[in-house]
Structure formats: structure tokens, C-alpha cells
Image (spheres, grey):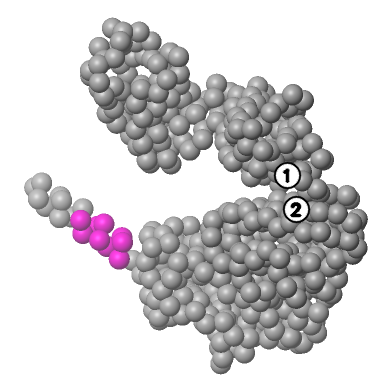
Amino acid sequence: MKTLLVSISLFFIATVNAQPCTPLGDETTYGTGNVWIGYVYDNSNLTSYKGYMNEGTVSSPNFDENFGTSNGNFNTNGCPVNASTFSVRYKLSKTFASGFYDFIVGGDDGYRLSLDGGATWIINRWNDQSYTTTTYTAQLNGSYDIVLEYYENGGDNRISFNVAASCSGSDDTNLYGTGDVWRAYVYDGTSFNQYRGFVTRGMLNNPTIDESFGGSNVNFATSCTGVQTETFSVRFRLNKTFANGSYTFFVGGDDGYRLSFDGGATWAINQWNDHSYTVSSYTATLNGSYNMVLEYYENGGENRVTFALASGSSLPVKLMSFSGAALNKKAVLNWTLAAGSNPDYFDIERSADGVNFTTAGKLTVPAATNMQADMNFNYTDAAPLSGKSFYRLRITDLTGIVTYSKAVALTFNDAANQNFSIYPTVVNGTGSMTIQSANTVKSATIVVTNAAGVRINQKVIGRLQAGQAISFMPFTATVAKGMYIIRIADDNNILHTQKIIVQ
């Protein structure tokens, strides 16, 4: 009887799962009003039609879709499709006013874009790949049948589309900034390939630049369409008048950078190659007006470009390191200046979004400070913002030159200390302990110190799943009886602090 019941149950389940569904949509109709019709197929070669989906809104055809999963099912207007191997043919009929337009399409895996119903492809990356974007600029006027095709062949999936009026011909990229305010012309591509608009940097009587473009692989806003900060370039222009004298220029970058005083005809500083952040200096006697050009490119990873100048023999500060930690609900910041620096004071700035900073505190360097050796500084923000905060230094030297540090991100969560369980808390110095987290920690590190803060042991755990319990030996050798501290950190953020007793 038991065998018969099991057989009946399995038959019922198989019958339910095998129930057919009907794909909706005709595979040919084009979307209108900026709303795409995406015809979905249950393999990577646009066959075995399963139903349709929509992308875009009445106000914009732009979209960025990851289908909600990398290996589960996602629903169409018809039948569900497994998100591991599938394909989509998006169709949209759209009318463009006369002008130039930038199309930016990205995908993981293959994608291709047509403006003539699929007869030809203006963008064609029909191959397996991690998420990559491609840009094409077209002069359009009238109605076009746009086809965007995409396929996924395992792993992560994503398809994105963006179109906007092009900056081509709208700005004079030969204009120079004045009054110590640079005009920075931004391009997609590492060789000034596609113009994306301009920004201004520097301020009246202070041409200093320290620019990280909002972060790595994010969209950097400009006067026009902006640019993705992964492979791009910038040409800064400034016309500046110098009184007769000696000047030292400091330019840094990750990756390439170069500085010219004659509009780009020759380069006084030239580090036009891929590298981590480095700084170069150049000293010259100047007198009169100069067309200064600072060029920069980024070829993947971190990005940063800096510019500073000093007159006579004075040198700006050189920041060797800047770091922070979230400790006991406070932001503890530490930094080091190199020997020979001449700092006057530090403004400690913080931000909730990494873009808009306000002053959280100020630290003045005593007048008698002698920077003949590297010198360490620190500051504690006792009332940080809740959630994620960004901190940076605004450093003013004795000549009035201002430089900025890169920002560090810290996270403050009042409930974080309640999310971990460590036991036992009374040990004999040789046994193991169990650590369990209620939440997932991306990059966990366990640090053991004595009561004076001296590190006894450290172990990198890596990803710690929610609810996962791990065994940990707090001591690798015999230790004295007394109180010790265990801290669990995620990157720079202290997530949990626990006292333990060794008997």
C-alpha cells in the first residue's frame, strides 16, 4: 500500500509539473512609446520561444536588466525560462529628432544592436563575456525599428541599454579655464575617443586637483551624458598667468598622466602608461601667461588624478597613508605625512554619499612642529553618521595650498554587536572557541589583542555566511592569565568586540 501511495503521489506531481503553458506574443510586433517588447527564448540561439517581457518606460527607453537570478526561473508573459541559458530579442519602434545620439549597450554574455530591424548591426559583441559596454554614435532623423538581441550562456546575466543626445559638436573642447578653474573635457575610451561632456575643477586662486571621479566603474556625471569610470580619459585646460619666479608642479595619477605648458605641443611631465598611483614633480622658471594642459587616462581598476603647485622652494604636503576604522561606535582615523611636508591644519570631512562632504572636525598642527621625519596624526569622530559614512582629509599647508586624501568608507550599525555569538568566554588558553554570525560577512577577520591593545593573533576567515558557526583557536602559544579582546572586522569596519578571560 505504501508503495502504491508513493507512486500515485509522484504521478500527481509529475502531471502538475508537466502541465503545458501557452507563450503569449507574436515575436514580430515592435514596442512603442519607449516601451520595448522583449521576446524570450529558452536557449542561447533565439529559438524555442516562451513568451515576452517589457523594458523601458513612457519617459525613457533606457533599462538595465539582470532577470532577478543567475540560475533560477524568471517569468515571462507566457512560460517561465531558466536564467542560465536563454536569449531575448527586444524590439522598439522609435522616432528621433534630427541630431546625433549616443547608444551605450552592455551585456553578460552576448549582445548586438540594430537600427534597421536586424538587417545590419551597429554594435555586435555576440560572444561569451563578462559584463562589457559598447558605445556607438549615430546621426538620426525620423523613425527607426530598433532590435536589441541578447543571450546568456551560464553564470551572471545582465543586459543594459542607454541612448541620449550626443555631446558631439555641442561644446568647444579647445576653450581654456581661467581664474585657476580648469575646464575638464571627459571622453569615453583611453585615447580621447568619444566626447562625453565637461566639468570644472579647482577654485579661485587655487588650481589644486584631487579627483577620483566618484569611484571605480561608476557613472561620472558631466555636462552631457557622463562616462563610466573604467576606461576613459580627461583633458584639463587652464590659462594661467605666473609672476616671474620659480615654481614646482606635482602631478599624480592612476593610470597615465602628462602636463604641458604650451597647449599640448610638448610635455614637461609625461607618465603616459598604465600604473598604480604615482606622483611626478617638475620645477621651472615662469613669467607670463601659459596654456596649461593636463591629460589623464584610466584603463581599469582604481582611478585618480592630482595636481598641485608651489612657488619658490616650498613643498606641499605628501600624504603617505590615510585609513580609518569603526570602533566602539566612533570613527578612528589615522594618517601619515612624509618628512619635509609643511602642514598647517587638517579639515576632517565626512559624507553620507561619498560626493557631498561637510567638515566633521579640525586638527591644527603646532607651529613648532619639525617635519624632519615621517609623522603620524589621528582624529576620532565620536558622533559619526549612522549607516555608511565616507571620510577624507582636506590638508592645508603653510603656503595655503590645499590637497585632499582619498575617501575611506566606514559602516556604523548600533545593532552590529548583537549579531555575533562567541563562546566560551572563559578559557584556559589552549582550547578552541566558536564564533557565529547572524548576518553574512563578506570578508571577516578575527583579531585577538591583550588588554593593552597588543595584537596576539589574527586570522582571515573570508566570507562568513549567516548562521554559520566556525571554530577558532584564539591563541597559538601559551599566554598569561587575564583579560583579552576579540574583534571581528569586515575590511575597515569593526563589527563586534568581545572580552574573554584566560584562567
- Asked if 436 appears above or below 150 in the picture, the reply is above
Q: Is residue 461 left or right of residue 334?
A: left
Please say whether residue 200 is visible from this viewpoint.
no
Taking depth in this image into account, of 454 and 45 the one nearest to the observer is 454
Residue at the spot 54% in from the left edge and 64% down from the top edge: 274
Q: Quadrant of residue 171?
A: bottom right
Query: In the image, what residue type sits under mark 1?
Result: Leu
Instruction: Mark yes or no: residue 348 visible.
Output: yes
Q: Nearer the viewer, residue 193 or 21?
A: 193
- At label 2, the amino acid type is Thr
Q: Is residue 187 left or right of residue 388?
A: right
- Relative height, residue 21 to residue 144 (above, below): above
> On the rendered image, what quadrant is the C terminus found in?
top left
398 or 102: nearer the viewer: 398
Residue 369 appears at what percent x and percent y? 71, 26
Residue 231 vs residue 164, the one in the foreground: 231
Local crowd at mark 2 within 10 Å, few (<14), some, or many (≥20)? some
Q: Where residue 227 appears, x then y in whole percent?
A: 67, 65
Name the residue located 49 percent from the left edge and 66 percent from the top edge: 131
Secondary structure character of the magenta stretch overall = helix
Label 2 to label 1, Cα distance in Å? 8 Å
* Residue beneath disc 1: 315
- Give the extent of the magenta segment: 10-18
Query: Circle 1 sits in a helix, a strand or a loop, which is it?
Result: loop
Which numbered disc, 2 or 1, marks the residue that appears first in the sequence?
A: 2
User: Which of the labelled discs sits on residue 248, or is there none?
Assistant: 2
